[in-house]
Amino acid sequence: MVLIHDFICIGRPVSEVVALLETRDTWLVPLASSAYHEGESLLGADRAVGPGVVSKRVHMTVGPPRSRSDSLVVPIHWEATGLRGLFPVLEADLEFSPLGHAATQLSLWGSYSPPLDGFGARLDRLVFHRIAEATVRSFLDGVARTIREAVPSPSGSTTVDLSGP
């Protein structure tokens, strides 16, 4: 089992961000598919193996949100469709936590088991874990972008974007 974690900060209050989770199935699931394709392009799988041979779709199941201390946690299950035995399955928690009164930290805490037993574990150490990290980062960037677009900055105030370049 391989652990994976990443986080991003959003310059919006957690109460406003959490309100968006009521419609999470309409925007969260498509972001997973987009992030998966970005990770796949890093691998170059569609060029190296040939179109249609490697899975092109990802399926995400989003569980009901639950409270943990002052955070809200959304469980996710993320897996490729098609040749399932060739791809890891990610079990993770998407956590929304307050950073003061005006910002939210969005974290993904998860784990996956590399496919193909020992050979897959070696490939994961060599290259696939970096692709998994890039996919998770792309997903978090997409979630943050969606939230920033959906939750306007308070008028008359300056919002500090803590997400980095």
Image (cartoon, rainbow, N blue to C red):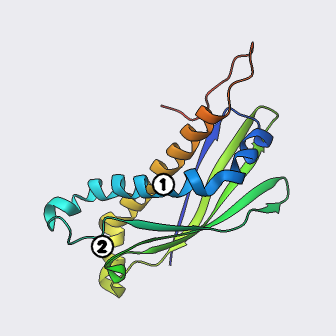
Q: Which mark is residue 108?
A: none
Most foreground residue, 81 or 4 = 81
Callout 1: helix, strand or loop?
Answer: helix
Whole-percent x and y of residue 105? Answer: 68, 44
Q: Quadrant of residue 46?
A: bottom left
From the viewer's perspective, tell me whether residue 161 is left or right of residue 78: right
Q: Is residue 28 above or below residue 56?
A: above
Residue drawn at x 39%, y 64% is 129
Whole-percent x and y of residue 137? Answer: 48, 50
Q: Which residue is mark 2?
A: 123
Determine crowd level at label 1: few under 14, some 14-19, many 20+ residues with C-alpha closer than 10 A: some
Residue drawn at x 68%, y 62% is 74
**Which amino acid type is shown beneath numbered disc 1?**
Pro
**Which amino acid type is shown beneath numbered disc 2?**
Leu
Residue 134 in view of the camera: no
Determine crowd level at label 2: few under 14, some 14-19, many 20+ residues with C-alpha closer than 10 A: some
Q: Quadrant of residue 16?
A: top right
Foreground: disc 2 or disc 1: 1
Most foreground residue, 128 or 77 = 77
Callout 2: helix, strand or loop?
Answer: helix
Q: Is residue 87 above or below residue 98?
A: below
Q: Residue furthest bottom?
A: 117
Whole-percent x and y of residue 97? Answer: 75, 48
Whole-percent x and y of residue 59? Answer: 46, 68
Q: Which residue is mark 1?
A: 30
Q: Are marks 2 and 1 in contact (CB under 8 Å)?
A: no
Q: Residue furthest right?
A: 69
Residue drawn at x 67%, y 32% is 11
Sequence order check: which comes first, mark 2 or mark 1? 1
Residue 25 in view of the camera: yes
Mark 2–mark 1 distance (CA, rounded to whole Å): 27 Å
From the viewer's perspective, tell me whether residue 16 is left or right of residue 6: right
